[in-house]
Amino acid sequence: MIKLLSNFIKSTSSELNPWKNIKILHTNIKGDVLSGIMVAIIALPLALAFGEISRLGPEAGIWSAIVGGIVGGLFGGCLVGVSGPTAPMASQIAMFMGVFVIGTTNEPDLVAAFSIIFLSGLILVFISILKISRFIHYIPYSVISGFMCGIGAIVILTQINSFVGLEAEKNIYDIFKNFRYTIQNINVHALYVAIPCLLILFLWDFLQKRFKSLLNIPSPLAALIIGTSIAFFMNLSIPYIGDKMNIAEQSKIFTFYFPDLSRISEFIIPAFLLAGLAVIDSLLSCKVADNMTGLRHSSDRETFGQGMANMSAGLLGGISTATATTQTVGNIEFGAKTPLSTIVKGLTLLGVLLGLGYLLAAIPNACLAAILFKLGIDILDYRILPVLRKIPISDLFIFIIVLFVTVYQNLMVAVALGVIIAILKSLNKLISRSNYKYKMVSILDSDFVLNQKQKKELDGLSVKVLKLNGPLFFGSTEQLINVYNNAPNHKVLIIDMSIVSSVDLTGIYSLEDIVKGAQSNGIITYVSNANQNIKQVMNNVDFIKNIGKEYYEDSTESVILQILENNNQNI
């Protein structure tokens, strides 16, 4: 028992140690610093807005962005994830503030609010220690894709008013309800900034190819400089970031809030709800980052990082933090590779809070709206959109449900609905999952029929066979990934699908990721033996096209012949 406890403590401390992040901070300094500053500029108006939404004040939003950046960057499990206030977290805090007020004044009970936030961070730390965060990897791809497209749609829609020089609407319903008013009251001066900025963002790749001197300049930075210059030299009467920053600068900067543990019975349920939302919001954003970068985050470490960030936010007067999808996507697009970028973002916002805000106050909201508009377009899942009409009906249904509920309701409800539908659809597969085992074996130990000459030739080629068994779906892909990641070194991989009974979108994309990952490491990879129904599904979602038609064969014999032929040509 003592040994088990000792091993648990050792493995946990190793997993949650910030040194894993610290030791790589120097590997992409230029790209990370530039990205961090750009993300800070985007995060500033969002932080102010989320602070106001939460009813704790704009400076609470900025503190959340600061501790999310610095503390989340040091302890987080997603190398390019950016932590800070998010719309779901701010909205949840606002709901609590309707309950926790001081007497009859209707003023928010700040001690209660920040105690709840602190306790939610403590709960997140315990969740990370229990190592249950990793279950995020079992969420179906159709849910993640629906979430990505829903967030992208929200970002695009919420920037319409700022793009045309008007005050942003509070929610999606107001955007549609007041759309006619928005069109009738467009501030033309804002378009002088917004349209050139948007054109720059879309045409920047083309301009970089034509003018090599632009290669090291990120497109958002170029848009920011040009948009701000247009507004300055034309003296445009449009909204600027500084219009809201003045509100924050009137308040005290440093105020510490120690949690009131004597009222823990009042705070514990809201704290659990806040922690649950933070887990879902953060880890789904990390999955989006995984899809964009091809990397794989550590869910337990990310949860621990959010726990530490939320505890810090509670002490310093910030609203709850989570990994923010929009800022994370921006971070990736701007060239970030390590947590240094999000730390720089936090330090930049700290500088703003300490009096350097005048450097950013001249940036027009229309310019930021153009950058966020482009980011919203980039968040959309272009892996699934081109083949949307061809994906399995059940996956399409889940995608549509999650997309619309994310936009019109909230993230937690959307994810819960998507996962419940997926579980009900695949209940039999989940119950019998333990009967299906994936295994990695040498080709000579496989059940392939080989003659003596083939055995002799293949013996020295380091060929491994990944044998798939049963349904390949969201409930089994984690086992598949673990089996392959723990496989011995090899030069050639054969993925045998002869006894795969069914597939879903998650299974196909996980398999595609394995193939592409192996190919990028110089491993020649073949997929073979899928039955006609499964092959049709793989064709529909462009699996065979994406891995290369020459790497799919209908029979094992064809794969063996191709391997031997390629080997003879290379001799």
Image (cartoon, grey):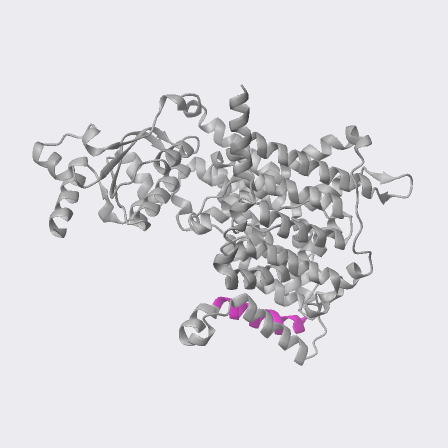
Residue 542 seen: no
Quarter of image, res 528 = top left
Rendering coords of residue 296 (x, y %): 46, 44
Most distant residue in the top direction: 1
- Seen from the viewer's position, the closer of residues 570 and 535 is 570
The region drawn magenta spans 187-202
195 drawn magenta: yes
Residue at x 33%, y 39% (from the top left corner): 537
Residue at x 81%, y 36% (from the top left corner): 260
For residue 57, side relative to residue 229 (left or right): right
Residue at x 54%, y 26% (from the top left corner): 6
- In this rendering, the answer to whether 445 lies above or below 291 is above
Quarter of image, res 463 = top left
Q: What main secondary structure does the magenta stretch of the protein show?
A: helix
Rendering coords of residue 456 (x, y %): 11, 36
Most distant residue in the right direction: 104
Rendering coords of residue 27 (x, y %): 48, 57
- In this rendering, the answer to whether 468 lies above or below 286 is above
Residue at x 44%, y 68% (from the top left corner): 205
Rendering coords of residue 80 (x, y %): 52, 52
Most distant residue in the bottom direction: 233
